[in-house]
Image (spheres, grey):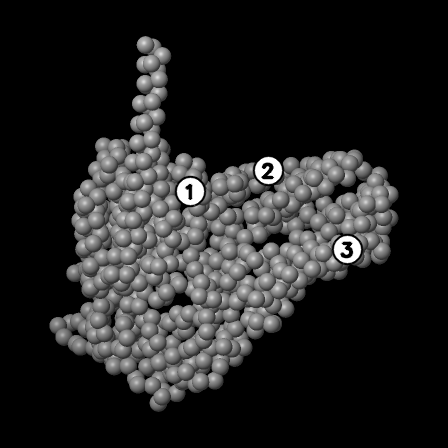
Amino acid sequence: MQAHGKLGSALLSATLALLGCQHGSQEDSLARERLLQHVGKLAREIGPRPTGSAGEARAREYILQSLAQAGVAAREEPFRETRISDTTDLVTDSANVVGILQGEGSGAILLGAHHDSRNACCPGASDDASGVAVLLETARRLARSPHRHTLVFASFTGEESLGLPGSRQFLASWKGPPLLAAITLDFVGTGQVFVAPFPRPPELWASRLLARAEAEAMTGRVLFDPWLVIVPRLLPLPYGADHASFLEAGVPAFNLSCQFPAWTYHTSEDVASRIDKDTLFASLELVARMIRILDEGSTPTADAASEYLPLPIGGSALFAPGWMLRAAGAILVFLAVCQLLRHWREVLRPAAWVEAIWVLLAAIPFTALAVSGGFAMESLLGFLAGVRHPWSAHPTSHLAGGLLAMSATSWLATGVFRFVRPSTRPGPYLTMAVLLQMVLAGSLAALGRHDIAFGFWLGAAGMLAASFCVSPIRRLAWGILGVVWTLPILSATAYRMFLELSGASLPPLTLEGVALAVALPWFLFIEHLLCLPEVLLDRRPPRLWSPAVGGCLLAVTAGAALLNATRPSYDSNHRAVVEVRETVDMARKRVEASFSSSESLNEVRAEGWNPAPLPDALWTQITIGWERIQPPDLQVDSEEGLGETVLRLHGSLLGSPRITSLMVRGDHPFQVMRGGVWEETKKYRRVNLPNAREIHEEIRIRRSDGDRLEYEGEVSGDDDLLGLNPRAADRVFRFSSKVRLAGRLP
């Protein structure tokens, strides 16, 4: 009976487990379908949703209904005027949508996204229907599970406008429990997910939280790339999101984002069909787990100054804190001193240093030859294709081809160097290899860049460890361990993403110079291996430089080059972005337009102005005669009465104005009406988000007799205001237009 009872219990347990798996699988399938439905509703059915537009109002209504269906009490929080700085107010007719799951704890955790899109032409599928979809499904999931703290689900408005008015207004009006943490979602429907590196590098607590969630969910869609930490410390990225408002308020916060095609950003190409349902569902799994971890754990501590470096290991990462980065340098310096003391007689010989310097000088041109293969291949492919970045559409393939080309030129460089090397003693080569590596690391550390220096310290550690070994195989093994750190850096897609998003262009020969500096110590290290007595007396190593080996390398390199040559540099999945900025200065009657791109402009034709192609450059500017345009119907006037002056900007503009601005300033303080109260200032700006072509903005001013004030009006949009009508294959044009008016009050 007992045996039968145990068997029955086992069968029951297995049956319940199977049913649970099936139920979970069904729930996951339904969640995937609902995620895509949310994106489709917002980006396809409703479409563009500029702040204050009818489309944005429909989006708010849909979000309210979806939260209610998920079992979350939700409400609209409308506002009209928001103070976004000491001298600037923003006016709009919009609202946030806020859902709340009450908790018994003393704090609140917020999950946010934004439901507005950039302009009247941008469907905003990735930016940010994807974030709203994940927010709605996270609310549905957490509404059915117990929680300790109050959970807040906020869909903000105005993120795509100016000054993040939605999140600022939320913080100003929040009366609930203190916010313990905030996570905002922006672009969570394509590629791999990561903590966004703006407005500052990802904080350590945020990266650890994401890593812990990934360890539980095992989505395989999380990116812990050293670039995400290193690049923002070198080059601040010109982007913002609603989490910045919380950071300014002292609330620990971060933005969850993902890899996305930069050419779709703020364009009509940001459509629902480009959303990856697997990434969308992975974001849901990660976000739900992160909120649960925060709800169950302690309050995170924001520390923008904390320095660390993520070291990817499989699907997770090891986070090396700042003290570890600094300790690596101290330990390596100590080991180097020990090695110097071990060979102090050799170190004190002037002839040894002359020999080492001569070895270094001789190795430089051969190292340049070794690394030239990849750059030469890409230059050739770019020349044949007539582009500057032939790798843009297929970066990984081109990286592989470049590495193969470098292997061929490295084979040639080391083969020739065998006959011209100035010394056959391994010591000078290893000495200069370690010295160069430590000089590079020490220089970076002295500049405060311990994150970049860490890799060079590891390389020096591998070389020093090799110096304690007798066997060439063990020395090679230690060298390989020292160079492994470079593998995470070789991320072609991450390099392309930062290059496109930052808008920066590297000076000529920058990459080549960096490659030479990094490769030179390793070229010397390899030469030290080849000069070991065991290797010099062995007949097998010279076979590596036989014609057969060279022919194989050349054939493989040629095959990779041919493959990459047959692939287009740009295609329907990756296009070059051309930024078109149009300016109409009505005060000076001056009209200008500029074109800029990371790719050459020589295939672009502004058919509405001049059908001839633009110059072969990355930036160019054209000036258009005032008589060739129809002046915008805009004007600024003033009206005096009852001890005050009313300054007005009014008129209409073709297209869809996105932002109107009226600014007044003076040398002496004056008063302006702000929120029903007169305030004293020397400068005041009032910004409006119009939802129609008709423009009307006004400022009420009180000033002393004789005070002269200057004003400046500006109307901005994302339209081709001048009708330039640029055209080019595999290009996406992102417009930015401004009309300026300026003058003085009488």
Q: Dot 1, how many residues are within 10 Å of its Cα: few (below 14), some (14-19), or many (20+)?
A: some
Q: Amino acid at mark 3?
A: Ala
Q: Is residue 600 visible?
A: yes
| Residue depicted at 44% across the width and 45% down the height | 222
Residue 268 x/y as whole percent: 34, 66
What is the CA distance from the residue labelled 1 to the residue labelled 2? Answer: 34 Å
For the N terminus, the image quarter is top left
What is the CA distance from the residue labelled 3 to the residue labelled 1? Answer: 45 Å
| Residue depicted at 19% across the width and 62% down the height | 93
| Residue depicted at 79% across the width and 53% down the height | 545
Q: Are marks 3 and 1 in contact (CB under 8 Å)?
A: no
Q: Nearer the viewer, mark 1 or mark 2?
A: 1
| Residue depicted at 51% across the width and 59% down the height | 496
Residue 740 x/y as whole percent: 32, 76
Q: Amino acid at mark 1?
A: Thr
Residue matched to label 2? 327
Residue matched to label 3? 548
Tell me which label, 2 or 3, sits earlier in the chain: 2
Q: Nearer the viewer, mark 2 or mark 3?
A: 3
Residue 474 x/y as whole percent: 73, 37
For the C terminus, the image quarter is bottom left
